[in-house]
Image (cartoon, helix red, strand yellow):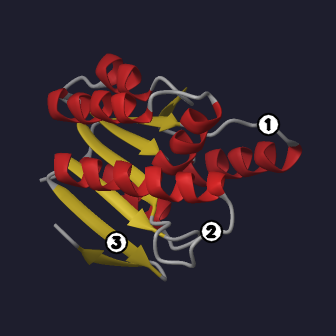
Amino acid sequence: MLTTLLVLGGARSGKSRYAETRVIEAGGDRVYIATAQALDDEMHERIAQHRADRGEGWKTIEAPLALAETIAAEGREARVLLVDCLTLWTSNLLFADADIARQTTRLTDAIANCAARLVLVSNEVGLGIVPDNALARRFRDEAGRINQAVAAACDEAVFVAAGLPLKLK
């Protein structure tokens, strides 16, 4: 039975599709918590395509920064929450000059206290080369720390590559 799940993978690995399938299979009211911000035309198109791909039956809430608060507010028992994705949330926190360690603790507390079933999606960004600039290295490091904390807080973790899930936890 689905309780809390972290779905990791690379770009275009199938992680979001896998997460959406798990949410649908779980049953209940589906809530999609989006962290993306449409700051340019290409991102507007990506977001529109994501919504079209999901289809009907989802309540969508935009939470580019206030993720822990949104999970706490929306995490009622009859619901299944899908957070997509922690990687964009990390970028948003960096650009907002937020205290990322504090926000991560708030997120893991929200996961622990969430009455809803919860699926979180994140990119695994630590498998490639070392970035050539300080901001990109900081992003990679912060994303890795967030993924570790969230994986520890979740009951289940899955890595998706080429559309194939590999159970980690």
**Kind of residue at disc 2:** Pro
- Residue most toward the right? 41
Residue at the image position 43 percent from the left and 34 percent from the top: 100
Please rate how many residues cluster around mark 2, counting C-alpha atoms within 10 Å: few if below 14, some from 14 to 19, many from 20: few
Q: Foreground residue, 27 or 10? A: 10
Q: Earlier in the sequence, mark 2 or mark 3?
A: 2
Is residue 44 visible to us here? yes
Secondary structure beneath label 1: loop
Residue that badge 1 annotates: 39
Q: CA distance from mark 3 to mark 1?
A: 29 Å
Q: Is residue 21 left or right of residue 78?
A: right
**Kind of residue at disc 1:** Leu
* Picture disc at residue 79: none
Is residue 116 visible to us here? no
Q: Earlier in the sequence, mark 3 or mark 1?
A: 1
Residue that badge 2 annotates: 131
Q: x, y percentage for residue 161? A: 44, 80
Residue that badge 3 annotates: 159
Q: Earlier in the sequence, mark 1 or mark 2?
A: 1
Residue at the image position 16 percent from the left and 27 percent from the top: 113
Q: Is residue 155 above or below residue 79?
A: below
* Residue contact at pointers 2 and 3, CB within 8 angstroms: no
Q: Is residue 2 left or right of residue 59?
A: left
